[in-house]
Image: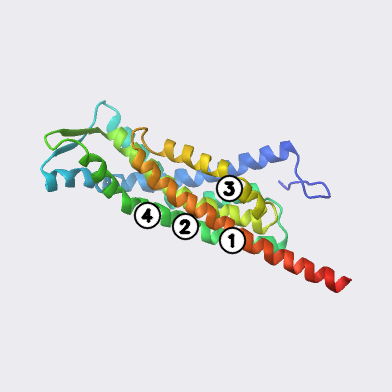
Amino acid sequence: MARTRNPEGRMSLGEHLVEFRKRLFSAALAIAAGAIGGFLLSDLVWAAIAEPILAIGERSGRLAEINYTSITEAFDTKIAISLTVGIIITSPVWLYQIWAFIVPALVRKEKVYAVSFFAAAVPLFLAGCAAGWWVFPHVVELMVSFAPAESTTLLTAKYYLDFTIKFILAIGVGFVLPVFLVLLNFVGVLSARAILKGWRWAILSITVFTAMATPAADVLSMFVLAVPMVALYYLAALIAVIHDKRVAKKQAALLGDLA
């Protein structure tokens, strides 16, 4: 169904809701398809996720185990792994759907920016997830090491998997957000001054986001996530400043030629 717009290219509230439903359905359908593949790989993925806990017992001699505390917990764990794998492997689809909803009407030059930054967002998200996966065993080992040597670490499968998913996906999302800031700046929606002016809100949002992504008592992991996200935010602001200066210079030169 073709979308109708007024002469300025804007959509009504109802059209926005229809567009949102369309994009959400497409993203959900892709994730569901990816989750089917994730279900087939769930046993291998769970074995890799549990490896850091098993390795702690082998290296330090401390007892560390993952337990299932309810009848359905094993099945719930498999479903959660399937959905997570589906989210990661279908990231090109739902990242595109997000961007297509945010900026539905771009001119040709802006579409070039969109394609370029979309091509950057997908590798960055996957790179962020990969970085989280690489850091994760070290974080687990560090956190467990604070327990007394004679103690026993008993983790429920649900808690351990929830921590793993939040940790890895949070880093993946954190890598992508600056890309959207820069892209919004390049298409003229967000200025570098606006990005820098909102630094307090950005840091507060990052802090809240990382606090939600990690267990309440795990302050170290919160800062491990927050620091690179803040650094990427300021990197996006720097790129936006450089871009705005170039645009201002071109506009000044154009006005000079007209004068």
* Residue that mark 4 sits on: 131
Q: CA distance from mark 4 to mark 2?
A: 10 Å
Circles 1, 4 touching at the beta carbon (< 8 Å):
no
Circles 2, 3 touching at the beta carbon (< 8 Å):
no
* Residue that mark 3 sits on: 98
Q: Which mark sits nearer the N-terminus, 2 or 3? A: 3
Q: Amino acid at mark 1?
A: Ile
* Residue that mark 1 sits on: 239
**Which percent across, then down, holds residue 256?**
84, 71
Quarter of the view holding residue 70: top left
Q: Nearer the viewer, mark 1 or mark 3?
A: 1
Q: Residues within 10 Å of mark 3 (few under 14, many from 20)?
A: some
Q: Which mark sits nearer the N-terminus, 1 or 3? A: 3
Q: Nearer the viewer, mark 4 or mark 3?
A: 4
Q: CA distance from mark 1 to mark 4?
A: 23 Å
* Residue that mark 2 sits on: 124
Q: Residue at x 32, y 54 (%)?
A: 134
